[in-house]
Image (cartoon, grey):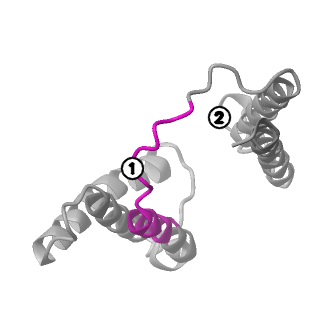
């Protein structure tokens, strides 16, 4: 790679981080700011993350303008990315986002876990596994998602989408 191309790529990364920060800030603008527990509203964390990304993006852009990213390893050209694993994990996240209001938090997060676990297994060369692996992943996903749901809804009084109106599923 030529240095000019490298500088353009570094600048593109810095600008991408800045745009991500601005997008997150724009989204946080529409979140209600009524104070909750300890005077902190639901918009607090998105604003913190947006501000942190903005500062990081500004520092990255400054680095690019003053000589480029310093002490950056060239890389050894290791293994190429394993795209099928990436696709499985991405589908898991997208399916979770699409179905969380239909299936509820617990089932959609368990499904996300199953798809992400399959992607991780394939990336490690373990194969997809049989029915037992799918069932095992589903059980583990449920065992993780259910306590998280109950802790958020029952103990923290944060409303998450449920499958039923009882508040337990």
Location of the C terminus (image quadrant): bottom left
Residue 169 can be seen, yes or no: no
Placement of 14 over or under 138, stated as above or below:
above
Residue 12, horizontal then vertical, whole percent: 80, 46
* Kind of element beneath mark 1: loop
Residue located 86% across and 25% down the image:
62
Residue 13, horizontal then vertical, whole percent: 75, 43
Q: Is residue 93 left or right of residue 27?
A: left
Instruction: Give whichever of 34, 57 is nearer the camera.
Output: 57
Magenta segment range?
Answer: 74-93
Q: Is residue 148 left or right of residue 144?
A: right
Placement of 58 over or under 112, stated as above or below:
above
Question: Could you classify mark 2 by the number of other residues whose Cα lies within 10 Å: few (under 14), some (14-19), or many (20 or more)?
Answer: few
* Kind of element beneath mark 2: helix
Q: Is residue 95 magenta?
A: no
Location of the N terminus (image quadrant): top right
Disc 1 designates what residue?
Answer: 79
Residue 106, horizontal then vertical, whole percent: 39, 65
């Amino acid at each position: 790679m030529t240095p000019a191309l490298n500088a353009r790529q570094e600048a593109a990364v810095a600008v991408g981080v800045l745009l991500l920060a601005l997008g997150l800030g724009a989204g946080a603008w529409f979140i209600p700011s009524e104070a909750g527990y300890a005077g902190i509203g639901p918009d607090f964390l998105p604003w913190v993350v947006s501000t942190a990304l903005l500062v990081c993006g500004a520092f990255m852009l400054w680095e690019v303008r003053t000589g480029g990213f310093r002490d950056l390893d060239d890389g050894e050209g290791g293994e190429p990315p394993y795209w099928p694993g990436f696709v499985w994990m991405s589908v898991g996240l997208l399916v979770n986002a699409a179905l969380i209001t239909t299936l509820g938090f617990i089932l959609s997060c368990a499904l996300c876990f199953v798809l992400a676990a399959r992607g991780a297994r394939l990336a490690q060369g373990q194969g997809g596994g049989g029915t037992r692996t799918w069932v095992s992943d589903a059980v583990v996903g449920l065992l993780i998602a259910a306590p998280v749901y109950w802790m958020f809804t029952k103990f923290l009084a944060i409303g998450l989408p449920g499958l039923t109106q009882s508040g337990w599923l």
